[in-house]
Amino acid sequence: MFRGVAIEANPVGNRLDIPLPEYPLEVVFVLVKPAFSGNIGAVCRGMLNFGFDKLRVIGHDGEWDEETRKRAKHAQSVLDNAQVFDEWASCMDDVSLVIGTSGKRELGSKIQFRHFLTPNELIENFQGLSGRVAIVFGPEGMGLLQDELRECDLLLTIPSWEGYPILNLSHAVTVVAYSMHNKISELTQLEKPMMNPDQRRTMRKTASRIAKSLPIHESKKRGAEEQLIRTLMRSGPDEFEAHRLLGILNDAANALEENE
């Protein structure tokens, strides 16, 4: 179980001096180059409203201005303990699963790439597992770039109205936190450790080897790689399952490469 640190209640506020809830998964919320300081503070407040306190920010100096502090309200501890990173790789180095978010809905050939889960589906797929999961949100106005989404193991979307699907950054984080808080609280299965970060990296590399060795046109290999990664990650393998699966995938990659 992962548990955050309890925060002393503010005598003029309504933050109670009680421990944060215990969740099987350690959920880390990641903001990539947020454009507006106030949104960072509002994200902290939305996270703590539902018992989450692990925040990472990519592309920020870690100096929080008055607007950020003001919008965080009684979630100052989330802000104070936030980790800042210069780039993607170091931020995700100790993470077992990277989940990218987007509100963009597309038709045609991109459906295969943008194969989304909802927050409830995500938790249902990984119930009973423990480990560190990063949920990544892109900058306001543009969201995560295509190349950044490709670095994610799974894609998550909020099932908003299709007429206006893009949410404000802090609202999106709050909705995901709310959904996960409610769904995680329902799950009481025996815990098993999720695949570790090294297994995740190896699985992505092996899937890439397989896709590159397939006897298909070069233009289709990237799509095959992405589809294979999404399918493997969506199954939510634990450490033992990932070990067995990696053995099979490695054998398949070797066999394909020998026949090239």
Image (cartoon, grey):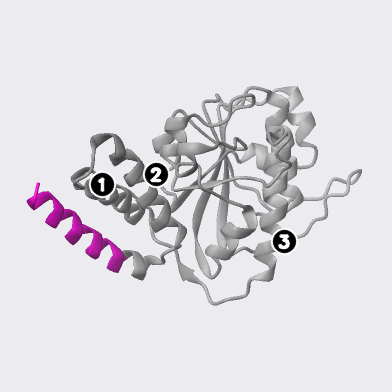
Asked if residue 132 lies left or right of residue 257, the reply is right
Label 2: which residue?
A: 93
Q: Is residue 20 above or below residue 28?
A: below
Residue matched to label 1: 211
The one of 182 and 114 positioned closer to us in this rendering: 114
Question: Judging from the image, what secondary structure is the residue with disc 3 in?
Answer: helix
Q: Position of residue 39 (x, y in %)?
A: 71, 30
- Total numbered badges shown on the rendered structure: 3
50 with respect to 139 (left or right): right
Q: Label 3, on which residue?
A: 182
Where residue 110 sits: x, y (%)? 47, 37
Work out how far the residue at label 1 is from the one at label 3, CA to CA, in angstroms.
38 Å
Q: Main secondary structure of the magenta part?
A: helix
Q: Which residues are magenta?
A: 243-260
Residue closest to the eye, 150 or 202? 150
Amino acid type, callout 2: Asp
Residue 26 at what x, y percent from top left? 55, 56
Q: Amino acid at mark 3?
A: Asn
Q: Are marks 1 and 3 in contact (CB under 8 Å)?
A: no
Q: Which one is earlier in the sequence, the residue at label 1 or at label 3?
A: 3
